[in-house]
Amino acid sequence: MTLTEEKAIIRRVKAKLKKGNYLYEALADEGISSNRWYRLCDKLGVSVPGPRGKIAKTYTPERVKVVKKRVNSGEMLKDVAVDMGMDPRNLARYCRNNGIKLFTKKALANNYKMRGEAMKGQKRKPYSSRNGQPLKRTQVMKLLEKGKSIDYIENHSEASRHYIYSLRKEFMESHP
């Protein structure tokens, strides 16, 4: 590739970046890899500031406006997010990080109410906190009552050795 061709590529990519394209999008249009692009820039001593990365296709302000409109008109957030191919938790995180409020107070209250009605008649799942510690606790305590060793308990439960020692200490105090 000649020097003039390399300069032409850099000019075209810069023009696309000025229009608002992302770097990887402009490079794909030109048909060159990012490694080659950076080598070209280094070789010619050019620095190209601009947005890097790929275009967000799932969580964009335009799509969030659509979600917001549908949620505030009375639909459940979970249903709207699934319809639009989004994960409700990631959508909520995106909105939180970008300072977007999805719900009006009335819509939020309505959403909570609908969620409660959707759960009526269903059995709740058994309580398990982070990492399932309360469920591990009962399992470890049963094994301690049977007189099993720390190694045995560690191999037959998902509890850590440290957690088993702390429960054994508690068990010994309650069963002298």
Image (cartoon, helix red, strand yellow):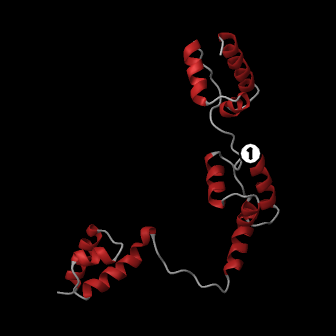
Q: Quadrant of residue 50?
A: top right
Q: Quadrant of residue 87?
A: bottom right
The percent coordinates of residue 173 (x first, y second) are 20, 81
Report the front residue among 3 and 169.
3
For the C terminus, the image quarter is bottom left
Q: Residue at x 72, y 63 (%)?
A: 82
Query: Residue flagged by tag 1: what amino acid is it?
Result: Pro
The percent coordinates of residue 74 (x first, y second) are 80, 66
- Where 91 falls versus 37 (above or below)? below
- Extreme residue in the left direction: 176
Q: Residue at x 63, y 36 (%)?
A: 53
Q: Residue at x 31, y 68 (%)?
A: 160
Q: Residue at x 66, y 79 (%)?
A: 119
For the N terminus, the image quarter is top right
- Which residue lies under the disc numbered 1? 61
The percent coordinates of residue 158 (x first, y second) are 36, 72
Q: Classify residue 28 as left or right of residue 124.
A: right
Q: Give SS at disc 1.
A: helix
The percent coordinates of residue 91 (x first, y second) are 66, 55
Report the front residue among 123 and 49.
49
- Where 47 falls versus 55 (above or below)? above
Q: Classify residue 56 as left or right of residue 157.
A: right
